[in-house]
Image (cartoon, rainbow, N blue to C red):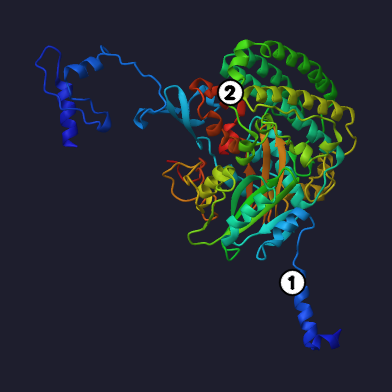
Amino acid sequence: MTDDTKTTQTLDVWVAGTEEPELAPTDEGAQEISTDESETRLDEQFGRVVEDDYVFDDDADPDERMILNMGPQHPSTHGVLRLQIELEGEIIRRTKPIIGYLHTGMEKTGEQLDFSQGGTNVTRMDYLSPFHNELVYSLAVERLLGIEVPPRAAAIRVLMTELNRCSSHLVALATNGMDIGAVSMMIYGFREREQILAFFEKTTGLRMNHNYIRPGGVAADLPPGWKDDVVAILDELPRRLQQYDDLLENNPIWGGRTRGVGVISAEEATAYGITGPTLRSAGVDWDIRKAFPYSGIEQYEFEVPLGENGDVYDRYRIRMVEIQESLRIIEQVMDSMPKGDYRVDDRKVTPPPRARIDESMEALIHHFKLFTEGYKVPAGETYVAVESPRGELGCYLVSDGGARPYRMHTRAPSFSNLQALPITMADSLMADTVATIASLDPVMGDVDR
Amino acid sequence: MTDEQGTPEAETIDEAMVVDRRLLPDNPVLRDLFEGFDDVTWELSIGQDVARVPSGRWLEFGSAAKEAGFEVCVDVTAVDWMRQRPQRFEVVANLLSMQHLLRLRMITTAPRQEPAVASLVPIWPGANFPEREAYDMFGIVFEGHPDLTRILMPDEWEGHPLRKDFGVGSVPVQFKESHKVS
C-alpha cells in the first residue's frame, strides 16, 4: 500500500523542465519492458532491423513452428469459434478447435422446463434452423407419449422444415461467398432468406425461435393466403438460384478458391461421425429423410445430391441442389396439403380451444392446469434424429414419469462436424481456412448449446 | 404338468429352456452380435434396440458392434440417476449402421465414486468430442481418451454442471419486497 502511493506520488509531482526523478522499473510480470539497451536490441525495437528471410522447409526444427490463434472474435468463424492453428510457414500442420464460448447450459435448462415449455428452449440452439430443433424435440416427446400427430400437422411440419432448410442453406451460401470474397453473394443470400422469414413471421409470429412445432402438432394453423406466399417463394427462388449459378459456377476465382480445398474422404467422414452435406460431399449416400423417414416425408419425391471429391466446391454445390430439392418437396406438400386438425385430439397434451374457455369452467381449469403443471410423460428413454441442414440432429430424451424431462440431450450436428476441421485443414494453406470453416457451416449456438 | 415337475429330468429341461429363452432381437445382424456376448442384455425401448453392456465389456462390445457393421458412433452422452439407481451414472452411446439401416443404443453404468468407463475413441474417432462433453458435464472419466479435457466449460470451472446435485443458480429479481440486488 505504502509502496504504491509512493510511486504514484513520484510520478505525480514531476513537472516538465525540472530534474527527472529516477523511475522504478515497471513491474508488469511478463510484460516488463526489457532493460537490455544494447545496440542490436535498440535497433530491433526502433524497427531499424527487419528480419523476413523465412524459407519453408520440410525438415524445419519444431521450434520454428508457430501457433496462431484464430478467433474467438473473428468475422470468419461464424460466431465464437476459436482455432489454434500450428503453422509451418503458410502450411497448416495441426488444428484444434476450442469451443464453449457460447455455452449457456441449455441441456440443464431443458431439465427445468416442462415438456410443453421445452420447445422455447431447443429452438434457440441452432438459430438458423429452429424448426428442425423443435421438430426433433417434439418427435421425441411424442414417441415417449405414444401419440401420432394428424396428417395435416405432419404436412405442415414438413413444409416448415423444408422452407427452413432453404433459408439455412441460403445463409450458408451467403457466408461462404463472403468468406471467399464474393461479397455480393452475402447480400443476395440474405435477401432471399428474408422472403422465407417473412412467411415464417406470418405463420408463427416470429422470424426466428418460433416454438411453432410443439408436442402434439403445431401451435396454429397456416394463415389464410399461405399458398400465395409459398407460390411466391417457389417462383422467386429458382430464378435467384440461377443467378447465383451464373455468378459463381464459371467464376474462375470461385473455382480456384473452392475446388480441391478442404478435402475429406468418405472413410474419414464416417469415422468421425460427420453428417449432412459434408458427408454427402464425400459421396456417401446418406440422408435420414430417406433412411429413417419422419413426419411422412417418404410420401414426397426428392433426390439426395452427392459429391465426388469431398471439397468445398462439392459442399457448395450440394447446398444449391438441396435447396432445389426442398422446393420440390414444398411444392408437393402444398399441392397435397391434407385437411383436418393441426393438433392431436388428445386432451392430455392439447389445450382446449380458445372459444371453449369462455363458455366452460372446466375448459378454463383444464387450460390452466396444462400450462402451470404441464402434462406427465411416461417413464422411458428414446433417441430420435432428423436431417437438419447441417446433418443428423438428434434428441435423446429421458423421462422419469414426471412433467419435466429427466434428461434432454441434443446431438448437435455442428458439434460433431467440427471434428472434421483438423482433418480437412491439415497440410493445407492458411488462406483456405475460412473457406473450409464456411463450407462446414457450423452454427455456434448449436455447437455450444 | 405337476407330475413332471417333481422329476429331476424335468428340471434339467427347464434350465435348458431358460437359457434358450434369453431375449434376442429378430434382426440377423443384431442377433449375431448379441449371441457373442452372454452378459449383454438386449431390450426394446419404445421400438428401439438397446444393449445393456457391463462396464467391463464396453470396449469389447463396441469393437464387435463396429465389426458387425455399425460404422458410425453418432453420439456419446450420460444420464445422472442420482439416488434413484444403485449405479449413479449411465453412459449412453448411439450407434448407426448405414449399410444395414440400423440404430443401436449401448448403455453401461458407472459408479458414484470416481465414475469411469473405457473410451470409444480407439474404435470410433468421432467419439472424441461427445466424450469430452460427457466428461465436462458429468465428470465421467473415459479411460484411454487421447485428450480428456473440458470442452464447453472454462478450464478452471469447479464441478460438473449436468449432475443433478449441481444447482441451476438464479438471478435475483428486483421487486419491492424482495432481497436487495447487490
Mark 1, other Cα within 10 Å: few <14 / some 14–19 / many ≥20: few
How dense is the environment of label 2, judged by Cα within 10 Å: few (below 14), some, or many (20 and up)?
A: many
Percent position (x, y) of residue A264?
61, 31
Marks 2/1: CA–CA distance: 56 Å
- Residue A378 visible? The answer is no
Report which quarter residue A107 is drawn in: top right
Between B155 and A198, the residue placed more toward the observer is B155
At 78% from the left edge and 26% from the top edge, which residue is drawn?
A: A325
Label 1: chain letter: B
Q: Position of residue B164 (x, y in %)?
A: 55, 55
- When the figure is inspected, residue A407 is found, relative to residue A428, above or below; the finding is below
User: What residue is disc 1 on?
Assistant: B19
Determine whether the residue tagged by mark 1 lies in a helix, strand or loop: helix
User: How many numbered marks are there?
Assistant: 2
Residue at 80 percent of width and 31 percent of height: A159
Residue corresponding to mark 2 = A261
Q: Quadrant of the C terminus of chain A?
A: top right
Q: Position of residue A382 (x, y in %)?
A: 71, 51
A371 lies above or below B4 = above
In the rendered structure, the answer to whether residue A346 lies left or right of residue A28 reads: right
Kind of residue at disc 1? Val
Side of B111 relative to B158 (left or right): right
| Amino acid type shown at disc 2 | Val
